Image: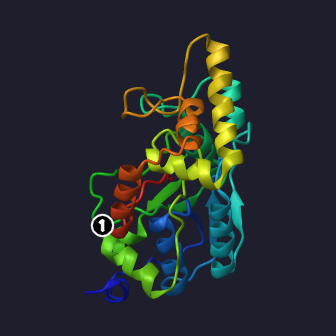
Amino acid sequence: MNWREKIEAAPRRPVTNREIIVALSGGKDSSAMALAQAMYEPRNYTYVITPTGNELPVMIAHWRNLSEMLGAPLTPILHSTRSLQGLIREQKALPNNRARWCTRLLKLEPYYQWLATRTPCISCVGLRADEESRPGMIFPDADGVEMDFPMRRWGWDINDVLEFLRDNGIDVPERTDCAMCFWQKLGEWYLLWRDHPAEYAEAEALEEFVSVMRGARYTLRSPDRDAWPAALKDLRAEFEAGRIPTRSLALMDKRRQVGACRVCTL
């Protein structure tokens, strides 16, 4: 069955007087889920986003476009510090793959706290049927939160998501995460330097700030990750000298062709 046949054959969510909240990161899965719900399971949904303040302009435009397509506002849930940059300065630390505090502090905990004020409610999260190993969310302090995974109910896998987006003319940005994510590829740092120099300069300045405050060299890129410098200042010097990470860019192109993405989601 294709995506349409699957969703039409799936059991409908019963009508409820509980508020139905849709966690809309803006990545391919949550975008497809929210739009398909609006089309095939119309309800009075509340759409929420958890911006970090470090999104690229194309991501802001994508959220704006989703709001227009859904015909409803997107409610931002914000950390008290309000941005990744502010939190880095407050913590005097850079997030990394061993201490991924950025997602917890900027996305999960604010959402949990906000959700606890809306109970009883239903929280819809964009996990697919082919992601059995992902448990979803745990709400230790939010009794009365019922979880719903619409795409699992529909039996949607990654191909259904991509076909739905393609059939409905929906373009999801290649970058839906932060501009200075420690997980991004070398080629993405190059494109950030080339296309968004102000954002690159801000990331470089934050590396320097944390390094000065802690009295040692700290970088968003892991040392020895590849043959390129770890520090963004030194990496910029390589880019300015004309060195281009062609292999990383080629791998990104190949990855893009199969519809893969890395996204920091709810």
x and y, in percent, of residue 146 in the image: 48, 58
From where the camera sits, is residue 225 visible? yes
Q: In the displayed structure, would residue 232 be above or below residue 144?
A: above
Task: Please report the residue visible at 34 percent of the width from the left and 61 percent of the height from the top.
Answer: 255
Q: Quadrant of residue 152?
A: bottom left
Q: In the displayed structure, would residue 35 be above or below residue 188?
A: below
x and y, in percent, of residue 68 in the image: 69, 79
How many badges with numbers are in the image?
1
Q: In the displayed structure, would residue 49 be above or below residue 197?
A: below
Q: Nearer the viewer, residue 35 or 263?
A: 263
Q: Nearer the viewer, residue 232 or 122?
A: 232
Task: Name the side, left or right, on which 246 lies relative to 66.
Answer: left
Q: Quadrant of residue 89?
A: top right
x and y, in percent, of residue 80 in the image: 74, 38
Q: Mark 1, residues whose alpha carbon is within 10 Å: few (<14), some, or many (≥20)? A: some
Q: Amino acid at mark 1?
A: Ala
x and y, in percent, of residue 261 in the image: 41, 59
Task: Please report the residue visible at 72 percent of the width from the left and 70 percent of the height from the top.
Answer: 73
Circle 1 sits on which residue? 129
Task: Please report the residue visible at 64 percent of the width from the left and 37 percent of the height from the top.
Answer: 203
Element type where label 1 sits in the image = loop
In the picture, the quarter occupied by the N terminus is: bottom left
Q: Nearer the viewer, residue 77 or 237?
A: 237
